[in-house]
Image (cartoon, grey):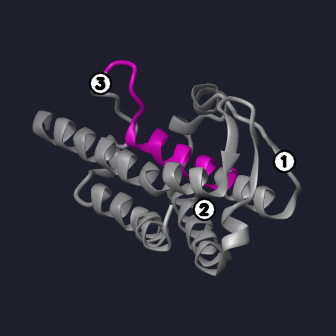
Amino acid sequence: MTHDERARLIDRYEAGYAEVVKALKGFPEELHAHHPFNGKWSAREIIHHLADSETTSAHRLRRLLTEEYPVVPGYDQDRWAILLRYNLRDHAPALEAFRSARETTTQILRAMTPDDWACTGWHTESGNYSAERWLQIYADHAHEHAGQITRLREALTKRS
């Protein structure tokens, strides 16, 4: 991956929080826990997922940068959503945790050297795992969920 490709992905990663906030605009608070699509998360569940995923991914990147070939554990995101009661909890602190983790991790990404980008480890679900692969995954992650939130908002506000 070239320096310019990484820079574009870092910019996209940094913009992820703003995309989620934009998707939440006009989304009535009382509808955040609703499930208009069977088997899909509510907006509230997505926000909690983003907070947990972001803090987990931030830790993964830090381990890649500070440990020699770390083992990076996966987790069952659907199990977390159920057992951590995503749909029953206020999501405002989760949104702030997501913002904060993104902001501090962006600082790290912008300061990384070529040697940092070469750091690798082993992900328990996907095998070889590098800092560049990490960036490819998380640059789009929030944008994908912002799209889900937008579709939820549109579906729920059409019904209202």
Q: Is residue 120 left or right of residue 45?
A: right
Q: Earlier in the sequence, mark 1 or mark 2?
A: 1
Q: Which residue is at 32% across, 45% downward?
A: 149
Residues at marks 3 and 1, CA–CA distance in whole angstroms: 38 Å
Placement of 108 over or under 131, stated as above or below:
below
Q: List the residue tagged with mark 2.
A: 97
Q: Is residue 91 visible?
A: no
Q: Residues within 10 Å of mark 3 (few under 14, many from 20)?
A: few
Judged from this view, the residue extending furthest toward the left is 158
**Residue segment shown in magenta:** 38-56
- Disc 3 vs disc 1: which is toward the camera? 1
Q: List the residue tagged with mark 1.
A: 70
Q: Earlier in the sequence, mark 3 or mark 2?
A: 3
Tell me which amino acid carries mark 3.
Phe
Q: Nearer the viewer, residue 90 or 126?
A: 126
- Please state the horizontal and vertical placement of residue 97, each as a whole percent of the image: 60, 62
Q: Residues within 10 Å of mark 2 (few under 14, many from 20)?
A: some
Q: Is residue 33 visible?
A: yes
Where disc 1 sits, the SS reads: loop
Q: Nearer the viewer, residue 12 or 43?
A: 12
Residues at marks 3 and 2, CA–CA distance in whole angstroms: 26 Å
Residues at marks 1 and 2, CA–CA distance in whole angstroms: 25 Å
Q: List the residue tagged with mark 3.
A: 37
**Quarter location, residue 43:** top left
